Image: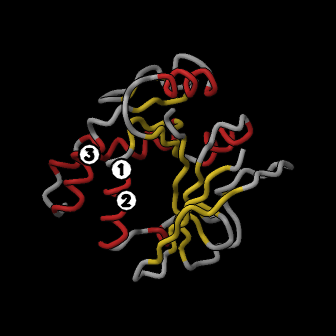
Amino acid sequence: MRRVTYSMGVSLDGYIVGPDGGFDWSEPDEELFRFYTDELRGIGVHLMGRRLYETMLYWETADRDPSLGAPMLEWAALWNPLPKVVFSTTLPEVRGQARLASGGLAVEVERLRASPDPGEIAIGGATLAAEAAALDLIDEYRPRVHPVLVGGGVPFFPREARRVDLELIGSRTFGSRVVCLGYRVVR
């Protein structure tokens, strides 16, 4: 069965964006960007909300940006053909390899888990991930912990009164002092 993973950059105090909406502190260096690219190779479908979808639209035409180097062009070449499911009640349509979700999150995840397609089901965006966590759909959390305290903002982990036991399955520290962790949900 396909795993559902949640992986994003997070400050040490637990936020994916700071109180000002900024996340410039999570800009990856070359080593970390290569790691992200390798991680992308294992994803079979990416679930996202409207805001993340709109942010990621840049990559649809990134190959036309002459300022991009080979690593970013490689990432775009992997990202663009990747199937994406967008959860939005306000978008009338999406483009590229994206489709609007036709059911609720649990229904979509159940359908994707049952699919014979390879690769993980990745969830991007804190709001969608919080909904997935509340529905107990996430199998692995993969925070990329950046050495910064931002003091507030959008939390990586949902703020709910629910205990989830986790098992550490991996960790890696990069030259930039970012620590990528992997935790499997214990069921």
Say which mark, if any, is on residue 40: 1
Q: Amino acid at mark 2?
A: Tyr
Residue reaching furthest to the right: 161
In the picture, the quarter occupied by the C terminus is top right
Q: Nearer the viewer, residue 127 or 176?
A: 176
Question: Residue at label 2?
Answer: 36
Residue type at numbered disc 1: Leu
Circle 2 — which element? helix
Q: Residue at x 22, y 43 (%)?
A: 61
Distance from disc 3 to disc 1, alpha carbons, whole Å, reads: 7 Å
Label 1 Cα neighbours within 10 Å, binned few <14 / some 14-19 / many ≥20: some
Compared to 110, does 16 lie above or below? below
Quick one: 47 or 110, which is closer to the camera? 110
Residue 101 in the image: state x and y as whole percent: 51, 22
Residue under the image location 55 percent in, 23 percent down = 108
Along the viewing direction, whichever of 94 and 37 lies nearer the viewer? 37
Task: Give the answer, above or below, for where 165 lies relative to 10.
Answer: above
Vertical arrangement, residue 2 with respect to residue 127, above or below: above
Find numbered disc 3 in the image and state the secondary structure of the residue it sits on.
helix
Q: Amino acid at mark 3?
A: Leu
Point out the tag, 2 or 3, that comes first from the N-terminus: 2
Q: Which residue is mark 3?
A: 78
Whole-angstrom CA distance, mark 2 to mark 3, is 11 Å
Q: How far apart, in angstroms, are the residues tagged by discs 1 and 2?
A: 6 Å
Residue furthest out toward the top: 102
| Left or right of 24 on screen, residue 35 | left
